[in-house]
Amino acid sequence: MKFSAKIMPMIDLVFKNYTSQKFPKEKFFQEILDTGTKELKLKNKKIEIGLSLVGEAKIKELNKKYRGKNKVTDVLSFPLDEARLKKYDILPLGDIFICLPFAVKEAKRQSISLEKELAWLTVHGFLHLFGYDHEKSKTAAKNMLSIESRILAKIPVLKKIT
């Protein structure tokens, strides 16, 4: 399949869905991440990201192992050291894990679509891969929220959802 320059993915996305739910598909996340890449002005970089949809047991296991928090959470990001692939002009950002059951519950609680919740979690995790951290300070949180809002406002698939 050939892509025109306009629609060619800017991110090499490794997508895995470890849940029984068939939606959303890789294309949904690709569009969100491509929008984030444009907003962060990374159009000319070769970027690699892993994105996995997991269940509550797996996200809890990861949260406990890597953050010392023995509880289910919505999204976890694990940035990689970009120096390893720099010689190939590739920016390996890392991995994002989204707990799909948590997202489903949160979307219902907020009375929003699952797509909107997943888009926010994806953008949130994506920004963490770049070092943005809302837990550092109120200023850092405000800055991250501002960038999240800008990216979310530009995601084409969300414009189709009423």
Image: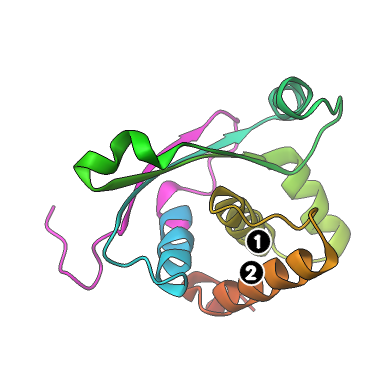
Q: Which residue lies at the image location 68% right of the left edge and 76% below the top edge?
A: 146
**Magenta segment, which residues?**
1-28
Res. 114 image quadrant: bottom right
The alpha-carbon separation of the residues under discs 1 and 2 comes to 7 Å
- Which residue is nearer to you in this view: 55 or 33? 33
Q: Residue at x 82, y 25 (%)?
A: 68
Q: Are marks 1 and 2 in contact (CB under 8 Å)?
A: yes
Q: Which label sits on residue 141?
A: none
Tell me the element at label 2.
Answer: helix
Residue 83 falls in which quadrant of the image? top left
Residue receiving disc 1:
120
Q: Amino acid at mark 2?
A: Glu
Coordinates of residue 92 in the picture (x, y in percent): 38, 42
- Quadrant where the C terminus is found in the figure: bottom right
Among the 4 quarters of the image, the one containing residue 30:
bottom left
Q: Residues within 10 Å of mark 2 (few under 14, many from 20)?
A: many
Of the two numbered discs 1 and 2 on the same chain, state the one appearing first in sequence. 1
Q: Nearer the viewer, residue 64 or 117?
A: 64
Whether 16 is among the magenta residues is yes
* Amino acid at dot 1: Trp
Q: Secondary structure at mark 1?
A: helix
| Position of 16 relative to 8 (above/below) | above
* Closest to the observer, 25 or 41: 41
Q: Nearer the viewer, mark 1 or mark 2?
A: 2
Residue ID for mark 2: 148
Instruction: Report if residue 138 lies within the magenta region.
Output: no
Q: Residue at x 42, y 47 (%)?
A: 26
Question: Where's residue 4, x and y in %?
Answer: 15, 68
Magenta region, main secondary structure = loop
